[in-house]
Image: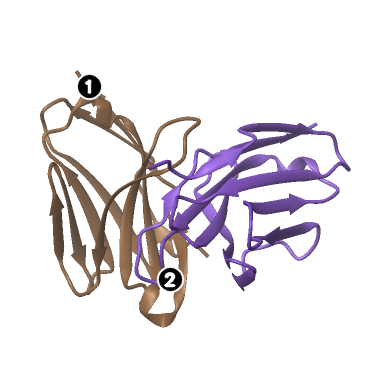
Amino acid sequence: NAGVMQNPRHLVRRRGQEARLRCSPMKGHSHVYWYRQLPEEGLKFMVYLQKENIIDESGMPKERFSAEFPKEGPSILRIQQVVRGDSAAYFCASSPRRATDTQYFGPGTRLTVL
Amino acid sequence: DQQVKQNSPSLSVQEGRISILNCDYTNSMFDYFLWYKKYPAEGPTFLISISSIKDKNEDGRFTVFLNKSAKHLSLHIVPSQPGDSAVYFCAASARDFGNEKLTFGTGTRLTIIP
C-alpha cells in the first residue's frame, strides 16, 4: 500500500514565477492537509481539503496561495508570483476520515526561490 | 502564539537508556495528541497518539503520558536505540470540536549515543 506521494521533491523557482506542488493521498484516503515548515521551525497548518471541497483554509496566506483537490487526480498547492520568503518545505498529509484518524505525511516538496 | 511548546531543542541519551521528550500546550480545547518522528529531508512519521480521555498509551518501546491538569504530555522511549536519533514533534488537535488541523511544537532533536 503506497504511502502519501508528493512531487516534485525539489522545486526551484525564480521570484515572480509560479510553483505547483502535487500530492496524491494514500489509497482510500479522502482527506488531504497541507503544512509548511520554514527553516528552524515546526510545521504550520495551511489548508484542509476533501474531494472538491476546501474545509479549512485558515492557515493559508490571503494572497498568492491556493489549493484544490479535484474529483480525479492529486491535490495541488499553487503559489503564484513566488517570493524568497516562500522558500520552505511543504508537506502533505492524508487521512481516511474526518476527525477520527491519524494524519500520515508525504516526503515533502522543498521549494527554493532564487 | 505558540500553543504547543517543546522547550528542549535537543536531548542526548545513552543507548539502552530511557529517552523522555516533553511537550506542553496552552489550548484547553485540544483533545487529541500525537508524536511524530522526522529524519532530515523526509516527512514526519507517525509514532503514537493519545486521546484526552486517557492518561497513557503504550506501543512497543514507545509510551505517551498525558497530564491534562498540567497540560503536559511526554513521550518515553525505552530502551533507546541509535535509529531513534531524529527530530521529534509533538502535535495536537481539537477533534471533538470539529478542528482536525494539527498544531505542532518546534521539535526536539534526540541523539542516541552508542
Amino acid under disc 2: Arg
Residue plotted at (50% across, 38% down): A107
The quadrant in which the C terminus of chain A is found is top right
Question: Is B4 rendered above or below residue A7?
Answer: below
Q: Mark 1 points at which residue?
A: B113
- Nearer the observer, A25 or B79: A25
Pointer 2 chain? A
What is the residue that sits farthest to the right in this orientation? A16
Residue A98 - label: 2
Position in image of residue B24 (x %, y %): 33, 61
The quadrant in which the N terminus of chain A is found is top left
Q: Colour of chain A?
A: purple
Q: In this view, does A77 lie to the left or right of A48?
A: right
Q: Is residue A18 left or right of residue B69?
A: right
**Disc 1 from disc 2: Cα separation:** 40 Å
Amino acid under disc 1: Ile
Quarter of the view holding residue A97: bottom left
